[in-house]
Amino acid sequence: MKHQVCLLLASVAVLASCAKGEYRISGSLKDFKGYGYDVDSVVLYVNGGNVPVTNEERIAAAIVETDSFYITGETDRIYLAEVTFYLKKAEEQTPFRVPVVLEPGHMTFDLRDGFFAGTPLNNDVLGFQQKLMTSSSVEEALAALDTVMALHKADPVGVLSLSLLVPYISPGQSLSYINELSEEMQQTSIVRDMRVQLEMKGKSSEGQTFIDFEATYEGRVQRLSDYVGKGKFVLVDFWASWCGPCRAEIPNLINVYNRYKGDKFEVIGVATWDKPSDTKRAIAELGIPYPQIMNAQKAGSDAYNIEGIPEIILFGPDGTILKRGLRGEAIEAEVKAALGL
C-alpha cells in the first residue's frame, strides 16, 4: 500500500522557545501487522498551548508505504504533538496515539519502545520511560521524575514523563507535579485532561466519603447507598462476567464473605460493563452468594474513575473509602484488620 495525503498546516499556539529547522518522523509498520492490523493512515497532530482541550490541529499527514511511514516538514518551535496511527482490522478502525516532542531532527518510532527517539527531547522521554521500567520502587521512580522536572518544567519532556508516572502515584502527588509545570505546559490539552481525571480520582480516593450511584434492572433501582454507609464494613467488587482476572478473584471474595458476613460486614458485587444475562449466568456458574447491583454498566466505574476491573474497594461503616485496588490475599488481610480480628 502506498499513498500520499497532501500536507496540511495549521496556525497553532507555540509551546516553547524557538528551535527552527526541518523535521522528519519515520518508523516501521511491520510490528502492527504482526498483531493483525493494517495501517490506513498516519497523521501528526499538535495540541496548542491555549487551545481548548477538545481541539486538535492537524499539521501533517504521512506518506505510508508497505512497511513504513514518514512525515517531513519544518518547525520554528518545539511542540507537544501526537502521531496517530489509524489501524484497521476487518471493518473496524482503531486510533493508536503516540505522543512526540516535535522538534528539528529525525524522530523514529519503534512499537516495542512505545515512544519516539532520535532527537534530544524525545530521547529524554524515552530515557525516563526506561528508568521507570527498571525502578525497584515508586520512591526510586519519583526521584527520577524529580530530576526530569528540574530540567523540563517548561517543555513537553516534563509533561510526558509525568504522564507515565501518574498511574502509580496518588492524585495529590500528581497534581503537585502538574502545578510545578510552566503555565504554557499546564494549558496543553494532555495536562488539562490529566488534571480533570486526577481531580475526579481524588474525590474517590482512600479517605474520601463514598460516591453514590444507581442502576436499574428489571424495573428495580439499586443504589450503592443501599449497602454502603449503613453501619457495616462493605467490600465492593466491580467486575464483569467476561473478565478473567475478575473471575479469578471471586473465590477470594466468597471465602471472605462466608467467614465474616454478619452485622459488621457485607460483600456486594457491581456488574460493570456487562450484559445482565451474562452476569446472571456467571453468578450461577461461580456460585456467588452475596448481593449484586445488576446492570451498573458505566455508572459505578465513572463514579470511581475505574479504568480497569476488577476494582475491589473496602468501605467503612460511615461510608469512608478505606482501601482501593485490593487483590488476592490482601482482601482478607484488610478485612480482618478493619474488623479488629
Image: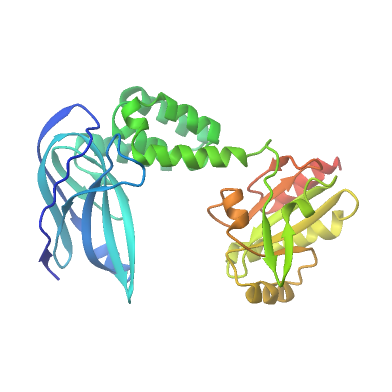
Left or right: 223 in relation to 109: right
Asked if residue 187 can be seen in this view, the reply is yes
**Residue 166 position in % (x across, y down):** 47, 39
* Residue in the image at 60% along x and 72% along y: 275
Q: Point out the image quarter for the N terminus.
A: bottom left
Query: In the displayed image of the protein, which residue is found farthest to the right?
Result: 263
Q: Point out the image quarter for the C terminus.
A: top right
Query: In the displayed image of the protein, which residue is found farthest to the front?
Result: 219
Asked if residue 131 can be seen in this view, the reply is no
**Residue 223 position in % (x across, y down):** 73, 56
**Residue 216 position in % (x across, y down):** 68, 65
* Residue in the image at 25% along x and 32% along y: 15
Tally of numbered tags = 0
Residue 203 sits above or below residue 92 on the image? above
* Residue in the image at 72% along x and 70% along y: 219
**Residue 11 sits in quarter:** top left
Query: In the displayed image of the protein, which residue is found farthest to the top?
Result: 150
User: Which of the colour schemes (rainbow, by chain, secondary structure, one colour) is used?
Assistant: rainbow
Left or right: 67 in relation to 36: left
**Residue 140 position in % (x across, y down):** 47, 31
Left or right: 176 in relation to 66: right
Left or right: 16 in relation to 250: left
* Residue in the image at 57% along x and 64% along y: 273
**Residue 301 sits in quarter:** bottom right
Residue 327 sits above or below residue 41 on the image? above
Residue 100 sits above or below residue 292 on the image? above
